[in-house]
Amino acid sequence: MRVVIAEDNALLREGLILLLTSAGHEVAGVAATGPEVLPLLLEHRPDVAVLDVRMPPGFRDEGLRAALAARKELPELPVLVLSQYVEETYAAELLGGGAQGVGYLLKDRIGRVDEFLDALDRVAAGGTALDPEVVTELMSRRLDDPLRALTPREREVLGLMAQGHGNATIAESLVVTERSVHKHIGNVFAKLGLPPSDSGHRRVLAVLAYLNA
Amino acid sequence: MRAAVREAGRATVHLLTGAGVALLCHLMLGFLMVTAVLTAAVFGAAVLPEAVLTLRRLAGLERRRAAAWSGQPVPEAYEPLTGTLRERIRTAVHDPGSKRDLIWGGAQLLYGMVLLYAALILWGPALLVDGFWCGLAGRRPVLLPLIGRLADVGAGWSRTLLLPSPEARLAERIEQLTVTRADAVAAHGAELRRIERDLHDGAQAHLVALSMRLGLARRAYGKDPETALRLLDQAQDQAESALTELRHVVRGIHPPILTDRGLAGAVRALAASSGLDVAVETGGAEDGPRAPAAVEAAAYFVVAETLTNAAKHSGARRAAVELGRAPGRLRIAVRDEGCGGAEEGRGSGLLGIRRRVAALDGTVTVASPAGGPTVIEVELPCAW
């Protein structure tokens, strides 16, 4: 895959380049400040963009703004946003244009190299990768009504779905069979009153819309 | 006519208590003279501060009376009588408030009595004249309202004489600033210690454990790769824990979203994640230059704390946050449609809000009648 990186911290930038190239990806371009990002993306049209939220010149949310602008200019471009901290509001803004090809992860997650590369692949393929911390925050807020009717296992499944994982990954991380994951998902959708949905990003959208309501 | 009589009656009662105060002044002045003589003769010195305190109480009573009649508060400003006996005597003598109180005491002695006599003398003719004037000619009473004016004059004089001098007000303001400044310094120190402890117990400890596991993994690498792998896994866990700890500490020092989005954006994020239906009105707080970081952080803290309270205790489903920019001030109002009855104690967080706001020389107003709504208004001075 061809990747464009926007990260101002040299240590992290070199680390990301090393990680991506060693995984067989090509780093097509690197931006170190907010205003460079959009022109770079328009020039290279990469398969996926990896953007840091806080960047020069203001060291505020330049990266996030660039990501939102990029999604407006190039709606098909998958964007993975990385940040030192996660904020529900930012997740909502990123997902505002649809959950297709959007990722929002803590920088900590890069350390789990396989999981990070998996999330990158998922986003590049049009899927979703939402940080577990955002999902936990969303779910803890909605612990009122129907969410309480879910069994602990069903809540786990709901959380993993919201993060954007497919059935196979969910089964693997919970150490159960795909058949039982399928059953749990059916129960979750029935209890929350959502129309049954296959894997894919329509399901993520439905789950996130429910959690965000 | 009846209303005029009732009003004149009320004024007469006011003048009557004024005459009572005048009598007390009489006693007080006598008491003070005796005290002065005793003090001059040294052995009565201990009584002097007590005498001045009693005079202050008497003046306080008159302030409340004047305020009740005119509806305008009469502020009070004295230097506190504390320390050793010598210091208390010196303050009692040098406080400009003492001199003003004395002058008022002498004046009240005269006008308290004179005004009451004037009112009493006025009653007879007033009833007669106004009885004819209103009853027969159907006009408005003319003499009875004069009794009310007499009470106005008394309250006005008391107010003028008892209003603290500009120096006394300045002294009180300095006193207040000294206290809040000391609080701010103490709060800052406590905050630094908390951050130090959080870093020491949290991130630092995790990093030590991480480094240890890396060292062990390195030793095991040659002869026991399986153990080395397990240790590397644990090291990674420790690194992640350290990062999580650091994120919490950073959030506690200065919420990152405040840096990113400014106060209005950060408050909107708070509202969105509060679990309540919150209407946010940012009236001009977003335009122009931003408030200083400390002011923004305090405002954010106030909104976060009040919204948490509203969600936890008030039973409200809806709330409203209003930010307003005024010349030299930032105004914050948080209102919830809950059950009200918010109390300062009981871990309501109101105390924390007061401390944080006082440190910046701001003000907090809480209105929370039983049955709701609860409205918390905060004003923070800030140079825009």
Image (cartoon, rainbow, N blue to C red):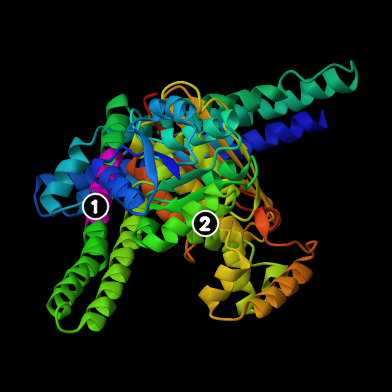
Q: Residue at x 33, y 66 (%)?
A: B241
Q: Residue at x 91, y 19 (%)?
A: B136
Q: Which one is in front, A139 or B363?
A: A139
Q: Which residue is more in the foreground, B10 or B349?
A: B349
Is B186 within the magenta?
yes
Look at the numbered disc 2 and give the secondary structure of its residue.
helix
Q: In which image quadrant can residue B212 be found?
A: bottom left
Local packing at callout 1 (Cα closer than 10 Å; few below 14, some 14-19, many 20+) is: few
Few, some or many residues within 10 Å of mark 2 (<14, 14–19, 20+): many
Residue at mark 2: chain: A
Q: Nearer the viewer, residue A11 or B182?
A: A11
Location of residue B305 with respect to B210 vertically, above or below:
above
Residue B316 position in % (x across, y down): 68, 56
Nearest the camera: A23 or B199? A23
Q: Quadrant of the C terminus of chain B?
A: top left
Q: Quadrant of residue A58?
A: top left
The amino acid marked with disc number 1 is Ala
Alpha carbon separation for disc pair 2 and 1: 35 Å
Q: Which residue is mark 1?
A: B186
Which residue bears the numbered disc 2?
A134
Q: Which residues are magenta?
A: B176-192
Residue B267 appears in the figure = yes
* Extreme residue toward the front, this view: A24
Identity of the residue drawn at 78% across and 24% down = B128
Q: Quadrant of the N terminus of chain B?
A: top right
> Where is residue A45 drawn, in percent x and y?
49, 32
Q: Main secondary structure of the magenta part?
A: helix
Q: Chain of mark 1?
A: B
